[in-house]
């Protein structure tokens, strides 16, 4: 049999790793001297150690290797790792595609629009269909904000709008929404529901709302070039906007001029 130092050199595995594997019950020495605790290994153990090393190189956690006592357990660990690697590959491909978009056709960097993909959380919202005010956004927000204000349920988060995808027959139309501390009872024109958590491609737009259309086209083009598809209604988040003082909108969001308006476009996406 071989001492731990000799077996370490023979197997290409450090003595430290061998001690760790022993401590975890993952790979035991063939014999341990009861008097001094020295570990000794057999050449017949090399195939077992090679399997552990190969699985570690593939990124399988030690705990999963330890629990994979039979062929079925090992297969499950490998399937899970494959799924993780495929997800990582898709994310790398998305980032590479984003780099290509940023570089542009001439190979020079473009900073017109900075798109960030992130996850937004679930939240309760009060909603109002724009058709109730014949498309008058200001009037719709005034009615909705006033109602939520009077109930004392306004959450300190920005309001927004939900714009359905063209041809989506399951969505009744464009809605505006106000975030809530907790759900409220619906009325004839105001509904309440949870806005679901989702992954979104986001773009910040500064300035008048009249130029939002070009920002939206830029975001949609970026998503298409990155190999993604839209996975829900476009969300418009109003980070800085104009509002009457009587609505008591949380401070910091209300500004005095259109040039100061700050709006985030959030496009739900699927890879």
Image (cartoon, rainbow, N blue to C red):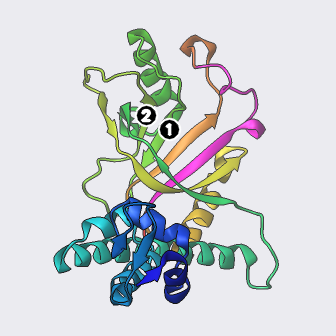
Q: Position of residue 113 (x, y in %)?
A: 70, 61
Q: Quadrant of the C terminus?
A: bottom left
Q: Position of residue 16 (x, y in %)?
A: 54, 67
The foreground one among 122 and 258 is 122
Tell me if I can see residue 166 in this picture: no
Q: Quadrant of the N terminus?
A: bottom left
Please provide the residue range marked out in magenta. 250-268
The answer to whether 89 appears left or right of 165 in the picture is right
The answer to whether 116 appears left or right of 269 in the picture is right
The foreground one among 48 and 265 is 48
Tell me if I can see residue 3 in this picture: yes
Q: Position of residue 125 (x, y in %)?
A: 38, 31
Tell whether position 261 is magenta.
yes
Label 2 sits on residue? 177
The crowding category of the residue bearing disc 2, from other C-alpha atoms within 10 Å (few below 14, some 14 to 19, many at least 20), is many
The structure residue drawn at horizontal position 79% and vertical position 83%, both measured from the top left corner, is 107
Contact flag, marks 2 and 1 (Cβ < 8 Å): yes
Tell whether position 177 is magenta.
no
Kindly identify which numbered label has been placed on residue 160: 1
The structure residue drawn at horizontal position 73% and vertical position 79%, both measured from the top left corner, is 104
Tell me the SS state at disc 2. strand
Q: Position of residue 127 (x, y in %)?
A: 37, 33
Label 2 vs 1, first from the N-terminus: 1
The structure residue drawn at horizontal position 67% and vertical position 75%, both measured from the top left corner, is 99
Q: Quadrant of residue 186?
A: top left
């Amino acid at each position: 049999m071989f001492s731990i130092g000799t077996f370490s050199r023979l197997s290409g595995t450090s003595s430290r790793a061998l001690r760790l594997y022993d401590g975890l019950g993952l790979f035991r020495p063939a014999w341990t001297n009861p008097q001094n605790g020295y570990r000794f290994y057999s050449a017949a153990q090399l195939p077992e150690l090679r399997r552990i090393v190969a699985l570690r190189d593939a990124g399988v956690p030690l705990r999963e290797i330890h629990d994979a006592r039979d062929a079925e357990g090992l297969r499950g660990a490998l399937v899970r790792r494959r799924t993780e690697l495929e997800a990582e590959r898709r994310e790398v491909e998305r980032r590479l595609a984003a780099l290509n978009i940023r570089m542009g056709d001439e190979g020079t960097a473009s900073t017109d629009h900075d798109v960030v993909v992130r996850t937004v959380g679930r939240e309760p919202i009060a909603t109002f269909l724009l058709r109730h005010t014949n498309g008058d956004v200001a009037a719709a927000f005034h009615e909705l904000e006033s109602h939520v204000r009077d109930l004392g349920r306004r959450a300190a988060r920005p309001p927004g709008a939900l714009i359905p995808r063209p041809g989506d027959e399951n969505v009744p139309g464009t809605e505006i929404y106000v975030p809530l501390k907790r759900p409220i009872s619906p009325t004839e024109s105001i509904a309440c529901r949870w806005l679901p958590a989702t992954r979104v491609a986001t773009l910040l737009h500064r300035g008048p709302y009249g130029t939002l259309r070009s920002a939206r086209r830029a975001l949609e083009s970026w998503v298409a070039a990155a190999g993604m598809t839209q996975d829900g209604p476009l969300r418009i988040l109003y980070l800085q906007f104009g509002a009457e003082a009587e609505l008591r909108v949380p401070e910091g969001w209300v500004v005095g001029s259109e040039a100061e308006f700050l709006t985030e476009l959030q496009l739900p996406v699927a890879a």
